[in-house]
């Protein structure tokens, strides 16, 4: 990050205020950035970050909306698997941030959220404003989708609360934590210095692996299987863990399936890759699940749903091994835990630690080209030919893949109309999945957070966003431009909340009503929205609207060159509405808004 950006004038740094101690603690935690939208409730901490620490280590990243601030931290965690700190203003800022907090929760992403409140002591409140910005139990707004929260009453208690929150957010299964700092605590004048503890003694424990006995049992089941299948779900970005997952599949000759909702887990060009991933299990994936005699699920996001999609009302005919720590997060408010899956061998352990243990137990035998008896090799769909006078999501994917051939990239984000076969994954950072919570508006923020984590490396960060997602989070673009975070954003702009058109069409057919009305209340036109202008107005290099294959190809080359120069580039690509990647039948009863 350019240290010349927002460099403060040197001043008094004596560290005699409550918020100075908190700022020093954040520095000791080795947090590079804090994302925030300003607020009076944390004015003391804001001052300490600037005038005590000099706005470095951590550096503040100004965001124009709290949801973007938290989404940026979420995107950072998707790449690094480490938390950033976001700061939100009292109850109102927290309300703005809640969707992004829920996304991080559903995506099992580490995040420390610092909040603040007007003086808890009512006698110290300013008239009106401190009253409406003070809550008796502010954390109640997010308690059902955070791992832990605290509202410390003193500076020493704040030190412990932040250390505990930092430890808990990184402990598996990961998720956001929240600490509320009373404005009076921050602005307290200290009589004597407060000693900070050695933060290295408050690290999170390493994720637990299975016992040797459990490893032996799983290894015997898998080794004896004729048609083993591995469902690779929420796993790490580590290259060592990636190699271990490949080695396990090869030792077993196991078919592998992955989930497009989460980051890349297995090379899509590998001969054991069973079928292109999807948001929902495809018919091809379901067919493979029905043939499997043993299924090893590695923290699969919706195991019950996948098994139900494959087996329907029939009893699951495969023996199921489920490895996950996720049950430790489940509560009765959010249904993100999904359905209760029928499991024969439940393993409460880290999926990656389990894979390493199984590879050691099984030894070096096996072949990368092993196949199930009678199973033909999975074939990638042939590249279709697209007319040059229009654009579609598959055409965007084809042109993009051609433009970036031979260089390393990271596909940070994709729209709902994306399909798994459109992108090759050969490294754990090639693809980062979605936001976790299934809403819209987080795309620009998470893309910027991931691009920040990738900044300075050789990967080209790419986000393909829907137009609704872009519009809800568009002001995050300013943060990327201001802090020199290179990023390519392609807007797959169908001028509609088209997924809901699919829902309306199906309801209309079921009720024998006109399907021609499905667009009403969905289309964004009259007036047309100039998305490139919205990006350009915040300092980005923007192109479009582009409507044809040739126009997009030219704009893409110019946009990539801009990103290589360190810029934020945005392309408004007007894609044909109506592309259905084979998932719409699964969407019929899904109450999403993408």
Image (cartoon, grey):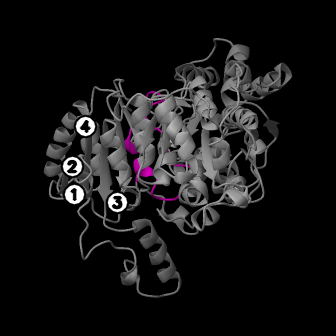
Give the Cα distance between marks 1 and 2: 7 Å
Point out the tag, 1 or 2, that comes first from the N-terminus. Answer: 1
Q: In 3D space, how far apart are the residues under numbered discs 1 and 3 (Cα atoms)?
A: 13 Å
Q: Tell me the element at label 4.
A: loop
Q: Nearer the viewer, mark 2 or mark 3?
A: 2
Tell me the residue that label 4 is attached to.
567
Q: Residue at the far right: name it.
A: 213
Mark before the other along the chain sequence, 1 or 3? 3
**Which disc number belongs to residue 542?**
2
- Placement of 45 over or under 575, stated as above or below: above
CA neighbours of label 1 inside 10 A, class few (<14), some (14 to 19), many (20+): some
Q: Which one is earlier in the sequence, the residue at label 4 or at label 2?
A: 2
Range drawn in magenta: 418-444
- Disc 2: CA contacts within 10 A as few (<14), some (14-19) or many (>=20): many
Can residue 262 be seen here? The reply is: no
| 253 relative to 150, above or below | above
Pick whichever of labels 1 and 4 is earlier in the sequence.
1
Instruction: Report crowding for label 3: few under 14, some 14 to 19, many 20 or more residues within 10 A (C-alpha).
Output: many
Point out residue 162 in the picture as x, y percentages from the top left corner: 68, 36
Give the Cα separation between the discs numbered 1 and 4. 16 Å
User: Does residue 423 show up magenta in the picture?
Assistant: yes
Please identify the dominant SS of the magenta region: loop
Q: Quadrant of the N terminus?
A: top left
Contact check, label 1 and label 3, Cβ < 8 Å? no
- Relative to 340, is 278 on the left or the right? left
Q: Which numbered disc covers residue 467?
A: 3
Q: Earlier in the sequence, mark 2 or mark 3?
A: 3
């Amino acid at each position: 990050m350019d240290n010349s950006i927002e460099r403060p004038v040197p001043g008094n740094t004596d560290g005699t205020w409550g918020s100075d101690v908190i700022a020093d603690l954040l520095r000791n935690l080795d947090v590079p950035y804090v994302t925030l939208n300003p607020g009076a409730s944390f004015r003391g901490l804001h001052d300490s970050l600037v005038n005590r620490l000099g706005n470095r280590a951590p550096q503040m990243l100004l965001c124009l909306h709290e949801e973007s601030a938290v989404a940026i931290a979420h995107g950072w965690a998707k790449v690094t698997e480490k938390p950033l700190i976001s700061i939100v203003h009292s109850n109102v800022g927290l309300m703005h941030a809640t969707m992004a907090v829920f996304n991080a929760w559903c995506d099992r992403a580490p995040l420390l959220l610092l909040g603040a409140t007007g003086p808890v002591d009512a006698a110290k409140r300013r008239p009106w404003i401190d009253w409406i910005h003070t809550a008796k139990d502010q954390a109640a707004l997010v308690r059902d989708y955070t791992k832990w929260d605290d509202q410390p009453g003193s500076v020493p208690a704040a030190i412990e609360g932040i250390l505990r929150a930092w430890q808990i957010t990184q402990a598996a299964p990961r998720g956001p934590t929240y600490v509320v700092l009373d404005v009076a605590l921050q602005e307290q004048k200290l009589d004597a210095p407060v000693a900070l503890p050695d933060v290295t003694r408050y690290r999170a424990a390493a994720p637990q692996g299975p016992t040797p006995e459990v490893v032996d049992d799983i290894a015997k089941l898998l080794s004896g299987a004729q048609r083993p299948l591995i469902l690779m779900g929420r796993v790490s970005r580590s290259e060592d863990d990636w190699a271990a997952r490949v080695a396990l599949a090869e030792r077993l000759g196991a078919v592998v399936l992955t989930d497009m909702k989460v980051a890349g887990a297995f090379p899509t060009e590998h001969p054991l890759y069973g079928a292109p991933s999807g948001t929902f299990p495809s018919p091809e994936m379901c067919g493979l699940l029905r043939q499997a005699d043993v299924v090893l699920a590695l923290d699969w996001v919706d195991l019950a749903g996948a098994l139900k999609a494959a087996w329907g009302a029939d009893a699951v005919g495969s023996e199921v091994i489920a490895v996950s720590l996720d049950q430790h997060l489940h509560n009765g408010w959010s249904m993100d835990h999904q359905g209760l899956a029928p499991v024969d061998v439940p393993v409460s352990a880290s999926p990656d630690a389990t894979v390493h243990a199984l590879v050691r137990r099984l030894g070096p035998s096996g072949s990368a080209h092993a196949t199930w008896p009678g199973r033909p090799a999975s074939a990638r769909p042939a590249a279709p030919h697209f007319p040059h006078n229009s654009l579609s999501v598959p055409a965007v994917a084809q042109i993009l893949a051609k433009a970036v051939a031979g260089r390393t990239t990271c596909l940070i984000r994709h729209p709902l109309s994306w399909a798994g076969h459109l992108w090759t994954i050969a490294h754990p950072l090639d693809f980062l999945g979605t936001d976790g919570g299934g809403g819209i508006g987080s795309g620009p923020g998470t893309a910027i957070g991931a691009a920040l984590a990738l900044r300075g490396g050789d990967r080209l960060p790419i986000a393909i966003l829907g137009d609704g997602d872009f519009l809800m989070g568009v002001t995050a673009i300013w943060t990327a431009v201001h802090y020199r975070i290179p990023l390519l954003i392609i807007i797959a702009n169908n001028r509609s909340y088209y997924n809901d058109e699919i829902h309306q069409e199906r309801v209309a057919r079921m009720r024998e009503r006109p399907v021609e009305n499905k667009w009403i209340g969905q289309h964004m036109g009259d007036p047309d929205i100039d998305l490139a202008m919205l990006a350009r107005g915040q300092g980005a290099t923007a192109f479009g609207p582009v409507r044809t294959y040739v126009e997009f190809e030219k704009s893409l080359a110019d946009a990539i060159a801009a990103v290589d120069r360190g810029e934020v580039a945005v392309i408004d690509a007007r894609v044909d509405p109506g592309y259905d990647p084979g998932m719409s039948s699964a969407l019929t009863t899904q109450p999403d808004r993408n």
